[in-house]
Amino acid sequence: MKHILSVSQFTKEDIEAIFAQARHFKKQVESGIILDPLAGKISTNLFYEPSTRTSSSFAAAMYRLGGSVISINDVQYSSVAKGETLEDTIRTLEQYCDAIILRHSEVGAARKAAAASAVPIINAGDGIGEHPTQALLDLFTIYEEQGKIDGLTISLVGDLKYGRTVHSLAEILNHFTVTLQLVSPSELCLPDEEKHKITNPITTHSSLDNVLENSDIMYVTRIQKERFADLTEYENLKDSYTLTLKELSKMKQSARIMHPLPRVGEIAFEVDDDPRAAYFRQMKNGLYVRMALLSYALG
Ligand code: NCD
């Protein structure tokens, strides 16, 4: 059974195969070809935390492959509200579907679900832990935008402490040779246990100014409000970085700006029309990469 739980499970060959499949699906969808390799298959979106892109792109990916989707996008209207355990919810849903896409607030929830499940579990974010499918679509986007990954200088900006997308992306980049520039307020720096997983050279910064000129990829993230025990700390940190046209004027023409989204002020709307703004293309890539991942898990 092919669960997707962590970026650590993928070899470089796996990643290349997933990307080749994603490119193939992209071409087919763009040419209007109707696909049905997953006809008759059903996936369940089981989301214990809010989501727009991950849940809808996984649903769209399933439909684009000819499959169908059960959507539990707000567990407060499910038996979870009555106190059902994660394991029992998984054992229920596995009776009705062929794969479960799970987002949960606890680190390790996807692994716990996988241990109880007779169908593949896809980790769509486990608390501050990991977001492996986002890391794959981020990596795919870096490659599509820059034509390569090796040799790039990649800045990871914002909430490096609680941002699961950063944790997964930084780790999957171990398959390539890049320079990582970590930009965060000292309160939100990358935790040591995450840093220890990284094999690429790292520099750390508190100011965006230090990294504007040399970045090939500026990967901006939201300060993760929902993870703060003390909301006044969040209020003090929430406006730490804002990318506007003024910052863009110092960046290379070949640089690309990425963001897993949602944004809450880190990238000014005026940046959207600059060709270097790649975040809308990035979310479109999410559809193709998730089509490839569903085929991998269910094909
Ligand atoms: C991210 C997440 O849920 O971790 N969103 C996403 O999946 N695109 C990032 C975030 O919420 O800040």
Image: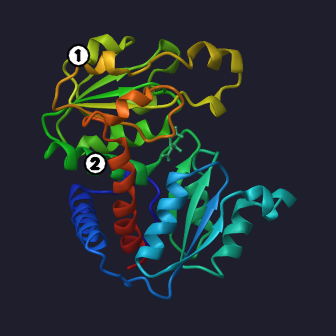
Q: Which mark is residue 250?
A: 1
Q: Residue pushed farthest bottom?
A: 40
**Which quadrant holds the N terminus?**
bottom left
Looking at the rendered structure, the kind of residue marked 2 is: Thr
Rendered position, 240 above or below 221: above
Looking at the rendered structure, the kind of residue marked 1 is: Lys
> For numbered disc 1, what is the local secondary structure?
loop
Near mark 2 (Cα within 10 A), the count class, few <14, some 14-19 or many ≥20, is many
Q: Which mark is residue 96?
A: none
Precedes in sequence: disc 1 or disc 2: 2
- The residue at the point 39 percent across, 61 percent down is 287
Near mark 1 (Cα within 10 A), the count class, few <14, some 14-19 or many ≥20, is few
Q: Which residue is mark 2?
A: 141
- The residue at the point 38 percent across, 56 percent down is 286
Q: Position of residue 209 (x, y in %)?
A: 31, 11
Mark 1 or 2: in front is: 1
